[in-house]
Image: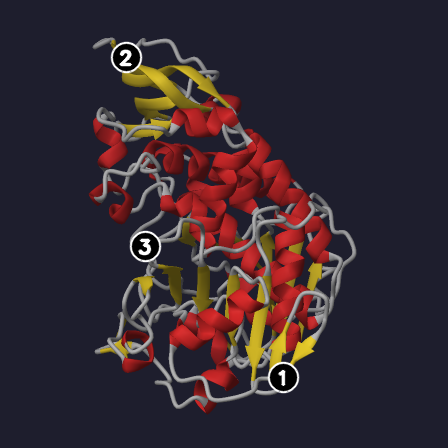
Amino acid sequence: MTPLSPVVSIGVLDVDGLRLADRTLVPIRGAIRHVGDLYKGARRQGLTQLWLTDAWVRAAGLPETLAVAGQFRELRHPFVSDGLDDLHAFPTALTPWLDLRKKGEAGSGVSIVFPLYDEHAVWGLDTDGATLLTALLAYARAVGPPYYRSPGRTGLDLLQEVGKRGADAKREFPERLPAPAGQADTVTELSWLRTLSPSERGKAYLHSYDKNAQWLSAAGVVELGLSGIEERRDAAGKLPFDKKLPGYWLARIAGAEERWACTPTVAWALERGQAVAITEAYVWTKHSRAMETWYERLRGARTALYADTTPAGRLALGALKYTYALTISGFNSAWQCDKRSPLYRPDWWHLIIAQANANLSRALHKMDAAGYTPVAVHKDAVYLVSDEPDPITACPPSVTLGTGSSIQTTAGRPHPPAYHRRRCLACTRVGAWGVSMWRDSWIILFMAGVQGVYPRSWGDPRWSGQRAGMGEARRLPRG
């Protein structure tokens, strides 16, 4: 594990007192009237982050939520404004993360953190002070930099800390990006389902297998563009493909309609022997595995936290998953674009997702070759029907399962809403893949939010599927 940064000291204020990193419980004497009192108490203990448990926030009479009309917003409140006589605050309202610094002083000051107001509930709901502090320290030691503001912000801070290749590539807002980088449907995550065969409709069980850390592993191996964008054309459709160059290729794959595809997608089509005709391309001549070091750090952190089966360890692992997922999706964030951030890299997002799709597709075709054809795929989850009640026994031989600990269904990937109606009979986290299993007389085979079947251009009828409609269902009789 990485040593905790010496410039960060974390404390958690609960109803029974202030908990420090050395497990000391400091009793609270006197009333806490506003954030100014919190700042003074934190400075006396040498803290740079002071976290407030949900129980403490309620006991202090503060609002339960900052949500207004279903949206989370900053809330003007005297608990903040009354304590700012000699303090600078950002922002000057109740918010999940409030930075305070004494007027006229340089330095980092103190961050006051309200997990109750975090709409993602990254650190759980009603987590007690001891568990929250242990989780925060475990996360900081595993990841390196401590958690700061949000999972995505923490991940981006780490990206700039661990590798100059990634940091150097993102010093300036990308003034020039190719047109497909700005198109929402250039790359999408795999989501499709197909009609069940007559024999499949008689199966009693639906198992789902999800590929753990799919985005993270893809980010570690994919080549990402740094500089030197080149546009290449060949109207005859004979533009040569170079799998070493990250970029976008306007290609007709396996006779399907011409569309933009990223390097990993075209490489996978050629690997399968499909015909590819390319008429135009945007490629980066200077490139690297810019997130490789970042990936290795988070992979090590994930391994360390995965071994910790305590409630605090589970919390820290959940926060880590948010960290890499929101960091990667942040490259395609409109907010990053609006503020002209150098971290706005939709091309990186496309290349990482394309690599993840190609990796999962290889796994799908190995399953198919072994006689296991999925009935649906949604992002990192593969759905199979079976008469075998044990998901591990029903697992395709091409999927390598390790050993792990039991988890709740909702602690893994998010499931389609219809699945929430059923009782989960078994759910086990195993090695690189997680497995879960349901049994019911009705199996709802739709994927929430699916707009179509992807990738449309690969031309393989076994994977073309059907357009997924909300409420589309297939009956699986009881066994």
Residue 308 visible in the shown view: yes
Give the secondary structure at mark 1: loop
Please state which amino acid type lies under the numbered disc 2.
Gly
Q: Is residue 288 left or right of residue 27?
A: left
Labels 2 & 1 near each other (Cβ < 8 A): no
Q: Amino acid at mark 1?
A: Pro
Residue corresponding to mark 3: 467
Residues tagged 3 and 1 counted as in contact (Cβ below 8 A) = no
| Viewer-side residue, 417 vs 393 | 417
Residue 462 x %, y %: 47, 43
Q: Hey, what amino acid is under mark 3?
A: Arg
Q: Quadrant of residue 348?
A: top left
Q: Between residue 224 and residue 16, name the one nearer to us.
A: 16
- Please state, as top left, top right, bottom left or bottom right, where the C terminus lies in the image: bottom right
Circle 2 sits in a helix, a strand or a loop, which is it?
loop
Label drawn at residue 269: none
101 with respect to 367 (left or right): left
Q: Position of residue 299 (x, y in %)?
A: 64, 43
Q: CA distance from mark 2 to mark 3?
A: 30 Å
Classify mark 1: residues with Cα within 10 Å, few (<14), some (14-19) or many (20+).
few
Between discs 2 and 3, the one toward the N terminus: 2
Which one is earlier in the sequence, the residue at label 2 or at label 1? 1
Of 279 and 244, nearer the camera is: 244
Residue at (63, 69) in percent of width and height: 133
Q: Which one is in front, 228 or 17?
A: 17
Residue 472 position, x and y percent, is 36, 68
Residue receiving disc 2:
237
Foreground label between 3 and 1: 1
Residue shown at 67% from the left, 67% from the top: 134
In this view, 430 is above or below 236: below
Task: Using the rendered image of the protein, determine whether residue 207 is visible from the camera's viewpoint.
Answer: no
